[in-house]
Amino acid sequence: MSRKMARMDVKAGFGLAALAGALLGTAAPAAAYTVYVTNEKGNSVSVIDTTTLTVTGTWKTGRRPRGVTVSKDGKELFVCASDDDRVDVLDTATGKTLRSLRSGPDPEQFILGPDGNPLYVANEDDSQVTVIDIEKNKVLAEIPVGVEPEGMGLSPDGKILVNTSETTNMAHFIDTTTHQIVDNVLVDARPRFAEFTSDGKTLWVSAEVGGTISIIDVETRKVTRKITFKIPGVTDEAIQPVGVRITKDGTKAFVALGPANRVAVVNAKTFEVEKYLPVGQRVWQLAFTPDQKLLFSTNGSSNDVSVIDVEAGKVVKSIAVGLLPWGVASSPN
């Protein structure tokens, strides 16, 4: 199907969704977006239309796809093919693989610079971060970090990159101009994700085994607070924070809690947990739609994605995808 025809279908679907929303007394999404989900064991990407909340396509990728992100112009999709030691670049109009980038060994997660280039990649098996010029497919730098690097966060101004090393239990602060580590911050066991607030003043780091979120003051690089989680009927060992997303206005944060099968809703000003949303099994990663009206969670063990209405703070749908969904990203159509 051509991009033009797909957009026509999306617009038609949006009209039906709006009508259904009006009849049911619920608000329809304000815009049409596409969500991409990597299926780690399916070696594929599931494509979801946010107006109909259905899977519209499945695209083949390299082996064990994990991290996923979209180019600034929305025309290309980047996928970490971890077992093939490369980053696949797919055409978002056709799903075809356009080229592969020299990612370094076992790419897990990555993040694009604020201008859409370069790409910063965590290489788990090689204890390094690789910096790639995506236009020239050229490695600009290889930065030694701690053992088992995974989480990748970038300050809004693009000046500070943070990588989390799962075994070293550190958040490494890296100057993106010099490609040198400027500080290391000790956090709790097995940090998996790093997320800056939109003002760049605070960094949230999840610790999967530690069961906490460390709040780090970016200027002083000190842990100023830790968030813990308690869920009735769920053991502490099952509460394993992984993915973190914070609203642009800085009022709410959402934390994926792994085998606890919950997403925590946190007041990002007071750091108090407001509620726990039941989702699928073994929730990994999270992604907002660009308007932040919807949040999607990947649920690895139940092979589905949960859709969360951000304003209402509730799960509105479950969508079956491929085998072991892991990463998720969204972009405008």
Image (cartoon, helix red, strand yellow):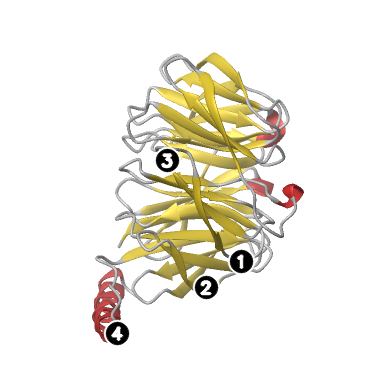
Element on which disc 1 rests: loop
* 1 and 4 marks in contact (CB < 8 Å): no
- In the displayed structure, 235 sits above or below 9; it is above
Mark 4 packing: few (<14 Cα in 10 Å), some, or many (20+)?
Answer: some
- In the displayed structure, 254 sits above or below 126; it is below
Q: Check disc 4 and give the amino acid type.
A: Ala
Element on which disc 3 rests: loop
Mark 3 packing: few (<14 Cα in 10 Å), some, or many (20+)?
Answer: some
Q: Return the residue nearer the eye: 233 or 118.
A: 233
Residue at screen point 45% across, 14% down = 178
Mark 1 and mark 3: Cα distance apart in space: 24 Å
Residue on which the image places disc 2: 318
Residue on which the image places disc 1: 280
Q: Check disc 2 and give the amino acid type.
A: Ser
Residue 133, image quadrant: top left
Q: Check disc 3 and give the amino acid type.
A: Ala
Q: Check disc 1 and give the amino acid type.
A: Gly
Mark 4 and mark 2: Cα distance apart in space: 18 Å
Element on which disc 2 rests: strand
| Residue 118 percent location from the top left of the image | 41, 32
* 2 and 1 marks in contact (CB < 8 Å): yes
Q: Can residue 61 be seen in this view?
A: no
| Residue 96 percent location from the top left of the image | 46, 62
